[in-house]
Amino acid sequence: MADDLKEQLAALSATLGSVEKVLDLPKMHKELEALEGEAADPDLWNDQTRAQQVTSRMSHLRSDINRVEALRGRLDDAQAAVDLDDAALLEEAAGDLPSLRSDVELLEVRTLLAGEYDQREALITINSGTGGTDAADWAEMLLRMYTRWAERHNYPTEVYDTSYAEEAGIKSATFVVKSPYAYGTLAGEHGTHRLVRISPFDNQSRRQTSFAEVDVTPVVEQTDSIDIPDEEIRVDVYRSSGPGGQGVNTTDSAVRITHLPTGIVVTCQNERSQIQNRARAMEVLQAKLLEVRRQQDAEEMDKLRGTHLSRSFGAGENKVRDYVLHPYQLVKDARTEVEVGNTGGVLDGDIDAFIEAEIRWRRQQES
């Protein structure tokens, strides 16, 4: 067992070494030290925006450094067990090996995220599609799936808007995943998700196929310069509503913004005031316009190169995944063909296998 374990540990150590080289740990430590010096300046908080950027970046850097160094420590401990040739330590190291391999591979996938916006936080909008009440229920199931996935990784989320359907489920929801590389990680989720099951809303218990659209865009930063003239938007205010269409407050605080040149419509009703909801809605609109610009730039580059690669993973013909709950249990990705039989686990947020495969697939398509 010791020889086999030694060989596997050597392979994992080489992989982690490549990851460490790509991430450039000395550079990360240097940046963290500079940020800590900036954070120690009491005048920093005179600029709230900059202060938040500094503290957020410090937190993410520490997390990334600790993650890499913890993996290296686990590998060193396992290697020490091999060197000592102690039966109990070898058994413990062998038991940790599958988890260690998974964690190293997950970190390796992170190094594949080298796109212009991959390091951004992710803004996600889920819209129910064809399928009536079942589709609305399916949209809410997807919302839960993604928020549970984020919880598994300790990624904070914030819901900007939820539009509830009359009978059950949601018409749409918009939320942000607040973690570095969330956009690059989740970009492959952008597109059509299809559910097949026995409808809980059909009194004859017939099989129903439902669809939902998932839109993933990078969160806008101050350097993006997305200017939206007032004459290009129409702002409507209305009363926020909850499940079943019931009002949740007595003031017209919810905001709907329509971008007239593109027809893009965004809403926000989860904040307490109309001003806050309008600010959030403008953030969402800016993110969607940034994505439009990104796609236009990519198409221009494809024309110049004489190539074509679909960069809008949510294009109508691009189905992301099938979730079949009847007559058998299977979730299968349309592009990578990764499939998982544990549908309950997937719907509870265990989607890393799909996400990692999508990242590798996209990198292959772009190379």
Image (tube, grey):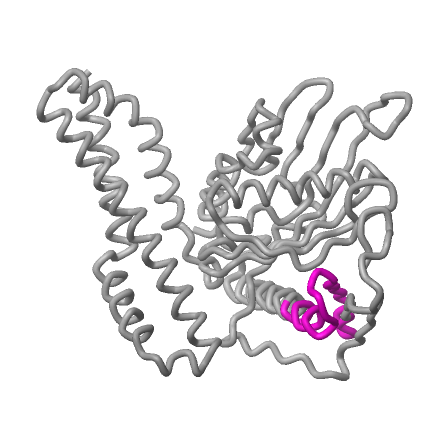
Left/right of residue 272 with respect to residue 349 in the rendered view: right
**Residue at position x 55%, y 54% in the image:** 177
Check residue 260 for magenta coloring.
Answer: yes
**Residue at position x 11%, y 20% in the image:** 85
Left/right of residue 118 with respect to residue 11 in the rendered view: right
Q: Does residue 282 sit above or below 25 in this rendering?
A: below
Q: Locate residue 298: give its quadrant.
A: bottom right
Task: Give percent across and percent down for residue 22.
Answer: 28, 53
Q: Quadrant of the N terminus?
A: top left
In terms of depth relative to the viewer, which is nearer, 302 or 117?
Answer: 117
Q: Does residue 50 sit above or below 210 in this rendering?
A: below
Task: Give percent across and percent down for residue 306.
Answer: 53, 60
Q: Does residue 154 sit above or below 5 in this rendering?
A: below
Left/right of residue 245 with respect to residue 213 in the rendered view: right
Q: Locate residue 99: give its quadrant.
A: top left
Task: Give percent across and percent down for residue 353.
Answer: 49, 34
Check residue 343 for magenta coloring.
Answer: no
What span is in magenta? 258-283
Task: Give percent across and percent down for residue 166.
Answer: 87, 46
In terms of depth relative to the viewer, which is nearer, 79 or 278?
Answer: 278
In terms of depth relative to the viewer, which is nearer, 24 or 364?
Answer: 24
**Residue at position x 53%, y 34% in the image:** 350
